[in-house]
Amino acid sequence: MIPRDSYIQKIRPFIGKDIVKVLTGIRRSGKSSLLELLRLELIDNGEDQSQFLTINFEDLAYQELSASEINETIKAFCSKNPKRSYIFLDEVQEITGWEKLVNSLRVTTNADIYITGSNSNLLSGELATHLAGRYIEVPVVPLSYKEVSDWNRQISSTPLHPDELFQRYLRLGGFPFIYASELDDRAALSYLLDIYQSIMLKDIVARYGVRDIDLLNRVFLYFFANLAQVFSGNSVANFLKNEKRSISSETLYNYIAYAQEACLIYLVPRYNIQGKRSLSFQEKLFLADTGIRQAVFGYNERDITQVLENVVFLDLLRRGYTVNIGKVEENEVDFVAVRAAERMYLQVSYLLADESTVEREFSVLERINDNFPKIVLSLDKFDRSRNGIRHQNIIDFLLEL
């Protein structure tokens, strides 16, 4: 398994505490492996293997049981264990009534409970009501470039040159299995296509009863084509009109909600920096992993600026930032990243190829009248910093702690 220390560090302060640890994220992003890494760390720290019970609810044997039956099984396990039990419930949303199950275990056992789910709204319903103040959510996304680079340097049996590794990361994204299994490009793309189809069929079509799968696919292809672009309902409708299809506003926004809940896409709102208010239109669309785009739509290398912007966006999420798109007068700031009292503004470009590009990327940041860091990111290897605005190589930025 690929070590994911940044996530373990987020969870570690809550180990053994009366608080449910909730890991959410897109399918196969590494949530199950994180549970296993936690188990190994706890055993290294003196806990016994007999204290652990792991249930994967994608296992058909458990799907045929009711939440009450599973509850009794887990309670019996805990009662036989003189020490604290550790309960790992994987892909918990597959079981009807899982919210009551988790809450029951919290109040009737002394177990340390960890759950994972491939649904961004895992905590939006009954569980959040029952567990108010008694859970911590850890969003999990596929591997960062730093994690991939560390794996390549320390663990891989066939390390790649850093430049080749970065190009591969842009094409294939960060799903851990690709790197842990050292898949070649053809096998990796097949694997990524399988992930997409699983999300479509299990997390969206089956869960929400979508009937027009062709229309759903066309909408998602629009998302992939317009990665890191301003999104609006009218733009999707116009695209579908050219495809000889039509869609109602209600259906479109349902599809968007389904994709968000399956952790496949993010819609990032715009923020008026000068007016200090959110704007309720023209969000930008990002994907949970650029590799899925390559497998389904292709053209990652041709659309390099869009892909780089998506990679930086995901990295900011991993670092715990809340991310918005900035607006200064009629100009756009790619990212306004906020974490507690910290704030920074970022522009992302492939290359600062000429003076007009330099002017475009730097001038919008120069209009922001505060003292928070302002950074222009590109793949250039020479420094074009000016007027207090830092220019940094994107790879160097991604490799920062």
Image (cartoon, rainbow, N blue to C red):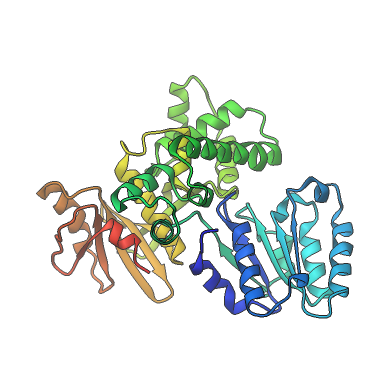
Residue 196 appears left or right of 59: left
Quadrant of image for the C terminus:
bottom left
Residue 286 appears left or right of 58: left
Query: In the figure, residue 124 lies in which quadrant?
Result: bottom right
Q: Residue furthest front?
A: 157
Query: In the figure, residue 154 lies in which quadrant?
Result: bottom left
Residue 49 position in % (x across, y down): 74, 70
The residue depicted at 29 percent of the width and 50 percent of the height is: 163
Residue 50 position in % (x across, y down): 78, 71
The residue depicted at 79 percent of the width and 45 percent of the height is: 60
**Which residue is more in the foreground, 351 or 267?**
351
**Which residue is more in the foreground, 193 or 253?**
193
Residue 270 position in % (x across, y down): 39, 55
Quadrant of image for the N terminus:
bottom right
**Residue 349, relative to residue 83: is it above or below?**
above
The residue depicted at 18 percent of the width and 56 percent of the height is: 381
Residue 125 position in % (x across, y down): 70, 59
Q: Residue furthest top?
A: 244
Q: Could one spot residue 233 in this view of the protein?
A: no
Q: Could one spot residue 366 in this view of the protein?
A: yes
Query: In the figure, residue 144 lies in which quadrant?
Result: bottom left
How many badges with numbers are in the image? 0
Residue 370 appears left or right of 115: left
**Residue 211, relative to residue 26: is it above or below?**
above
